[in-house]
Image (spheres, rainbow, N blue to C red):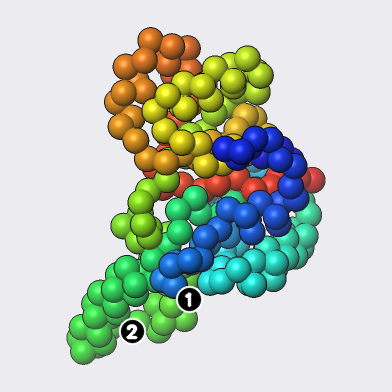
Amino acid sequence: MRSLKASGMIFVKEIDLIKTYCDFSDKNSVYVILGIARKKNNNLTNSQEIVYREVIKKEKEISRKYNKIKSLIKGQPEYNFYIYITVNPRSIVKAYFRLKKQMIVWDKEVFGGVDISEHLKKIDGRWISCLMKECCKNGRTKFLFDFDCKCDIKTKKFEELLKKHTTIIWFKETRNGYHIVTEPFNFKLLLEEKDYKQFENIVELKKDSLLFVEYIGK
């Protein structure tokens, strides 16, 4: 696995990527680690897609949560999985208020005689879903560029183009290209660059997405 930070090329294990990337300096920040088997990578329908999710609340939990996800994936050896980490930290305060609003709706339903038992059985999943909402990210949004190309020349040119407008935080090789995390900036200025046209069909900006960590295939 090859990663690139602003200081230059470094070689790290997947678990070290997570430890280096995650910042828990804000006590309200958590990250979500996911193991996903998607329809497009497996013989699955949309409803059959498999998603394992764990909330990492502090640095010392990273190894345990990462190993738990990997253990769950090993129990499904017939599928191809991708492991991701949320590119932006999640705010437990914002997610709390979002979940609280949902619970108020449930309160009203109870008084109306509605059975909310299924909601309550899945409340842990509801909590993670709230954390994953874009409105529940914590701090400034990091940009993630999904660069679908492994040509060294094009990759270097795109990297240089980005550096004209922003700071590159992380540069992670994926199966088909790279995930490039940057500080937020005026994206319109990048689009106006003459040299950007050659990248239009191979790059996508994702403002609150998932950073690729590892692929585990059959």
Identify residue type, mark 1: Asp
Residue 28 drawn at (x, y percent): 41, 71
Q: Quadrant of residue 123?
A: bottom left
Q: Is residue 42 visible?
A: yes
Residue 117 drawn at (x, y percent): 40, 84
Q: Residue at x 64, y 72 (%)?
A: 60
Identify residue type, mark 2: Asp
The tally of labels here is 2
Does 126 sit above or below residue 47?
Answer: below
For the C terminus, give its image quadrant. Answer: top right
Q: Is residue 81 visible?
A: no
Residue situated in front as seen by the camera: 17 or 76: 17
CA gap between label 2 and label 1 equals 18 Å
Residue 174 drawn at (x, y percent): 65, 36
Q: Residue furthest front?
A: 7
Q: Which residue is mark 1?
A: 124
Q: Which element type, helix, strand or loop, lies under badge 1?
A: helix
Numbered mark located on residue 115 in the image = 2
- The tag earlier along the polypeptide, 2 or 1, is 2
Query: Few, some or many C-alpha atoms within 10 Å of disc 2 (few <14, some 14-19, many ≥20)?
Result: few
Does 73 sit above or below residue 142?
Answer: below
Q: Residue at x 48, y 66 (%)?
A: 25
Q: Is the residue under label 1 in contact with that under label 2 (CB below 8 Å)?
A: no
Residue situated in front as seen by the camera: 212 or 168: 168
